[in-house]
Image: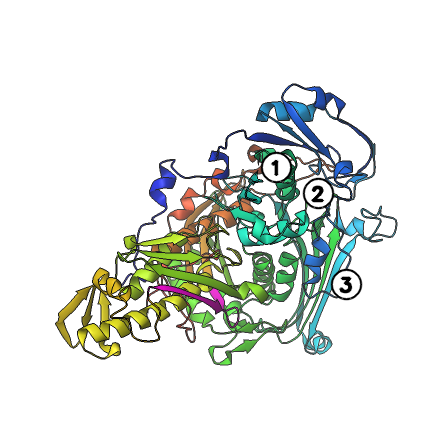
């Protein structure tokens, strides 16, 4: 049987759900020390002095590290260089210090690290450090931050505007001159904390006899961590090994380089002992935020609901410093603002502003949800103001199927799409007309009833170096298959899906395939898992090396079966001539022959070891349509989800179970952000959402009701790319049938 498209249960789950997983905090090393971090209590202040004498004298404390100790020893995180790789018109990104020296710029910024024999002693040592602050006025509102009289957060840049981007296309002035109606609206998208189940953690162990520094870290990209550690610690890459063990979720936060990622290895080198740091939940809530944008839109519209042009102003609250992905979300929102709609003229202005808040970065969808929210609300307002059906407004503005490949006004190339058909299926499944009739018939003493629609596009696979991924496949003499990948999963189920790809190509059971990842010592390169690239790029790299393996094995089998190589079939652990099926070999017999020098053709290497790379030719853009029926209490405002439908263009599905898991997660997080989540600060810049109790993450707001849904089993792409293993990763997807 073929395994691609089958709902195979995740191979990872038995060990994870029974507590046999190995996360960073599960790792114990002999003589291991523990670190704790002193963090700023102020949003904006000068540091007049840091007194660590009391911490030094605490029994059990081994070392205390401050910003003064690393001047000239460790460089700042090169966030400006990271941001400069992006296409921006202006850039004034500050450098990101590992430890604050003269100034703190947000509550939670690292000031000092205490290392002790016990984690509780390390925390006690932190409490003994005395910092004398000179408080400064915090800058919290991005619009206030750009005023001429606003305090400058980073004097070296001379401005609080960190980045500007402008995109223009089409005859916008003419569009507004011809418009019958103009819609104006601002859409705030609040900050939130990603809050993965496992917080960040780092363990570093230096072995001087081998001149090897090994780092265990909860990350999406161990090879990238290795590259930055080599640069920041000034060590050759061959003296570094980075391991990502089981990783308990991320949603973008573990795709960056943080101060602790560098400081803990530095301390292990200095102390010649293993050092461990695991983030507390409150630290996690203060270390990294997603979203945090305000999108202001003016839409020039005809009376029939057709959009003629858009003016969009995006103000992004970037926080106090740049992280690796800080610029990604606002830039993506800028480029993806048009979604599945034909917008002939547009002017988008993006302004990224520094504030005295936690730095922001990529969070599930990385700018796409912000853009989709803005466009979908605008379409609803168009329908409301013009007295039109919201579904009809969408139909009239969709990019038509015969326009693909389509170039958007913001420069994106859309490879395929039949958006109207996807929307129609969602309307059918949710019973759109029926629920609208029920809403109109609601009595004043009954709860309000609403039917919401949203259609969107999602670019996957990222750009630049992220479009390239490597893979390796080995088959040992007994027939056991091992796949090596630079993809480093954190919940995607890659061990299962990659095994399915290999099993399908070689006609064996997926249980015979072992997938190895997350260790720079076993595989030399990899861009990690982010930007929905896990299967679409990493899986395609695996598929590419499998084609080479299949070709060589088929050639060898053709000699043993005396038939053309194209007639060799791999199925159910056997290899046979499809024209004469009684003549067959077992897969282990064929593999054994591959290790026999007598049978291997001249010019072909003995053994089975295949390596290759895959380059995504362009980021494909999928689409989806969601519909929801919501009941709202007139007295309390409580929202109750009555029905939820999602229709998605999935491309080629490897495993429907994994796909449905992505749908459920995406919907849950969307509901959480829509109804309960948000990160709030006081006027002094103090976080008022410092715990999960305050944050009300999606799992805490009754979203289990949302899972009583039907995932629409359809795909509506104008054409398919069959070389791609799957369209998967972080985008919520649905099951697909012809």
Q: Residue at x 81, y 48 (%)?
A: 154
Whether 105 is drawn above or below 347: the answer is above
From the viewer's perspective, is 350 left or right of 227? right
From the viewer's perspective, is 655 left or right of 67? left
Q: Nearer the viewer, mark 2 or mark 3?
A: 2
Q: Residue at x 50, y 71 (%)?
A: 395
Queried whether the magenta region covers residue 298, the answer comes back as no
Task: Tell me, for residue 98, which label it has, or none.
Answer: 2
Q: Position of residue 7 (x, y in %)?
A: 30, 55
Check the picture and name the quadrant holding the C terminus.
bottom left
Which of marks 3 and 2 precedes in the sequence? 3
Nearer to us in this view, 501 or 384: 501
What residue is pinned by disc 3? 90
Whether 500 is drawn above or below 633: the answer is below
Q: Residues within 10 Å of mark 2 (few under 14, many from 20)?
A: many
What residue is pinned by disc 1? 268
Q: Position of residue 174 (x, y in %)?
A: 71, 78
Residue 291 at least partly seen: no
Label 3 near label 1: C-beta < 8 Å?
no
Q: Position of residue 133 (x, y in %)?
A: 81, 31
Q: Nearer the viewer, mark 2 or mark 1?
A: 1
Which of marks 3 and 1 precedes in the sequence? 3
């Amino acid at each position: 049987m073929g395994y691609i498209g089958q709902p195979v249960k995740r191979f990872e789950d038995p060990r994870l759900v029974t507590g046999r997983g190995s996360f960073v905090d599960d790792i114990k090393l002999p003589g291991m020390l523990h670190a704790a971090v002193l963090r700023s209590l102020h949003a904006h202040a000068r540091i007049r002095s840091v007194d660590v004498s009391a911490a030094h004298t605490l029994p059990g404390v081994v070392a205390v590290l401050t910003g003064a100790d690393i001047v000239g020893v460790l460089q700042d995180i090169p966030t400006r260089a990271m941001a400069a790789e992006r296409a921006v018109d202006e850039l004034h990104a500050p450098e990101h210090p590992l430890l604050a020296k003269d100034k703190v710029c947000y509550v939670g910024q690292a000031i000092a690290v205490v290392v002790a024999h016990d984690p509780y002693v390390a925390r006690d040592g932190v409490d003994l450090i005395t910092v004398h602050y000179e408080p400064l006025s915090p800058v919290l509102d991005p619009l206030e931050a750009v005023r001429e009289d606003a305090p400058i957060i980073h004097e070296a840049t001379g401005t609080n505007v960190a980045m500007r981007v402008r995109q223009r296309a089409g005859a916008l002035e003419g569009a507004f001159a011809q418009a019958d109606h103009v819609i104006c609206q601002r859409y705030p998208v609040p900050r939130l904390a990603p809050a993965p189940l496992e917080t960040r953690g780092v363990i570093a162990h230096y072995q001087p006899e081998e001149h090897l520094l090994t780092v265990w870290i909860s990350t999406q990209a161990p090879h990238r961590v290795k590259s930055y550690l080599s640069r920041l610690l000034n060590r050759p890459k061959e003296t570094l090994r980075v391991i990502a063990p089981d990783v308990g979720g991320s949603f973008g936060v573990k795709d960056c380089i943080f101060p602790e990622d560098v400081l803990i290895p530095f301390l292990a080198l200095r102390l010649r002992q293993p050092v461990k740091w695991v983030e507390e939940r409150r630290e996690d809530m203060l270390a990294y935020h997603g979203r945090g944008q305000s999108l202001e839109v003016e839409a020039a519209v005809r009376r029939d609901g057709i959009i003629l042009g858009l003016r969009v102003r995006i103000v992004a609250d970037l926080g106090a410093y740049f992280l690796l992905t800080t610029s990604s979300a606002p830039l993506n929102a800028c480029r993806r603002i048009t979604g599945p709609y034909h917008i002939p003229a547009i002017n988008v202005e993006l302004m990224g502003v520094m504030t005295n808040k936690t730095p922001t970065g990529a969070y599930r969808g990385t700018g796409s949800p912000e853009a989709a929210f803005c466009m979908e609300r605008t379409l609803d307002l168009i329908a409301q103001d013009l007295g039109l059906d919201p579904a009809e407004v969408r139909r009239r503005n969709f990019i038509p199927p015969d326009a693909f490949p389509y170039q958007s006004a913001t420069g994106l190339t859309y490879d395929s799409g039949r958006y109207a058909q996807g929307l129609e299926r969602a309307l059918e499944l949710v019973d759109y007309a029926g629920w609208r009739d029920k809403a109109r018939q609601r009595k004043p003493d009954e709860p309000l009833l609403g039917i919401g629609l949203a259609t969107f596009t999602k670019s996957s696979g990222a750009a630049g170096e992220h479009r390239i991924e490597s893979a390796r496949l080995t088959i040992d003499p007994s027939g056991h298959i091992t796949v090596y990948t630079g993809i480093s999963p954190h919940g995607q189920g890659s061990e299962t899906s990659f095994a399915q790809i290999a099993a399908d190509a070689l006609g064996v059971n997926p249980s015979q395939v072992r997938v190895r990842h997350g260790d720079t010592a076993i595989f030399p390169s990899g861009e990690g898992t982010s930007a929905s690239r896990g299967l679409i790029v990493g899986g395609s790299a695996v598929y590419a090396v499998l084609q080479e393996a299949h070709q060589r094995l088929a050639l060898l089998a053709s000699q043993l079966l005396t038939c053309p190589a194209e007639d060799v079939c791999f199925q159910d652990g056997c290899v046979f001539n499809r024209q004469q099926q009684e003549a067959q070999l077992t897969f282990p017999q064929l593999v054994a022959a591959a290790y026999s020098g007598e049978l291997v053709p001249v010019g072909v290497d003995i053994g089975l070891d295949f390596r290759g790379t895959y380059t995504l030719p362009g980021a494909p853009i999928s689409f989806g349509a969601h519909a929801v029926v919501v009941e709202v209490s007139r007295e309390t405002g409580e929202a109750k989800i009555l029905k939820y439908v999602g229709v998605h263009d999935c491309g080629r599905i490897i495993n429907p179970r994994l796909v449905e898991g992505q749908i459920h997660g995406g919907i849950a997080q969307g509901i959480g952000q829509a109804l309960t989540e948000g990160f709030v600060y006081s006027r002094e810049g103090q976080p008022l959402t410092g715990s999960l109790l305050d944050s009300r993450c999606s799992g805490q707001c009754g979203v289990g009701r949302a899972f009583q849904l039907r995932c629409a089993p359809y795909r509506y792409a104008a054409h398919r790319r069959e070389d791609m293993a799957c369209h998967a990763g972080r985008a919520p997807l649905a099951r697909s049938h012809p």
